[in-house]
Amino acid sequence: MPSFPVPSNEAARQAALDQTCGLVEGGDPRLDALAAEVRRVTGCPTGLVSLVDTDRQVFSGRSGFPQRQTARDYLICAHVILSDRDLVIPDTHETPRFRTHPVVVNPPHVRFYAGTPIVLRSGFRVGSLCALDYAPRDAPSPAVMDRMRALARQAAEILEGGDPPPPAAHLDGADEVPGERTGACAVPSRAVTPREVTPRRQPDAPGPADASPGRIPTSSR
């Protein structure tokens, strides 16, 4: 039995991922730009566009994170594809469901997570657009979560072969976010009660080396 949650439509979801967008394993500068925009709008040190494969997660877009993939059970993104709801965890240590999660008790010791599913036109959830912090934070404002959902829609368009406009004209590089430190937010906020945020609508159809959060396990694939 897998050590991570599996959607009831996993076989069809995986087929949609393979047939529609693959895994973009080498990365895509447009997806890196989306990840950098996640950092900018949330103030967090890490932004990711994560695609959930059979037994691994591939970060097709990343900013402030050293690795291109991990085992599927090693990040919280595997939980986001279970529903259309955003998942916000202000403090993993205060959340029984996640306080013993591998990415919490091992490097990079995630304390804050905010993610929204990436949904294809077919309706399948293939991954997550998310922000990570290594200190607890307040839950993002509704406006910030709205922006993250819009970025997730742009990610889906790119993965399905589209070419949406860049998320912010001032972004010159995926790992450069002016005025922010890598590895921790400039002013960590106090923890608040964990919650899952407003449901999102289904589509119409059905940094520097010493600032790295640390090496973490990758899939054997």
Image (cartoon, grey):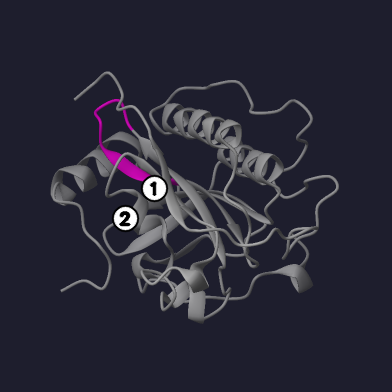
Q: Give the amino acid at mark 1.
A: Leu
* Element on which disc 2 rests: loop
Tell me, yes or no, whether the two marked residues, 2 and 1, touch with CB atoms within 8 Å. Answer: yes
Q: Is residue 127 magenta?
A: yes
Provide the residue designation for mark 1.
23
Q: Give the amino acid at mark 2.
A: Asp
Query: Does 168 appear above or below 51?
Result: above
How far apart in space, not on screen, are marks 2 and 1 (Cα)? 8 Å
Question: Which quadrant would the N terminus be assigned to in this image?
Answer: bottom left
Q: Going by the image, does 169 lie left or right of 4? A: right
Q: Position of residue 145 (x, y in %)?
A: 54, 37
Q: Position of residue 212 (x, y in %)?
A: 69, 69
Query: Does 78 appear above or below 172?
Result: below
Q: Residue at x 47, y 48 (%)?
A: 115
Provide the residue designation for mark 2.
53
Q: Nearer the viewer, mark 2 or mark 1?
A: 2
Q: Residue at x 20, y 52 (%)?
A: 7
Q: Residue at x 42, y 34 (%)?
A: 159
Q: Which mark is residue 42?
A: none
Q: Position of residue 35 (x, y in %)?
A: 60, 44
Segment colored magenta: 120-128
Q: Going by the image, does 181 lie left or right of 23? A: right
Q: Residue at x 70, y 28 (%)?
A: 168
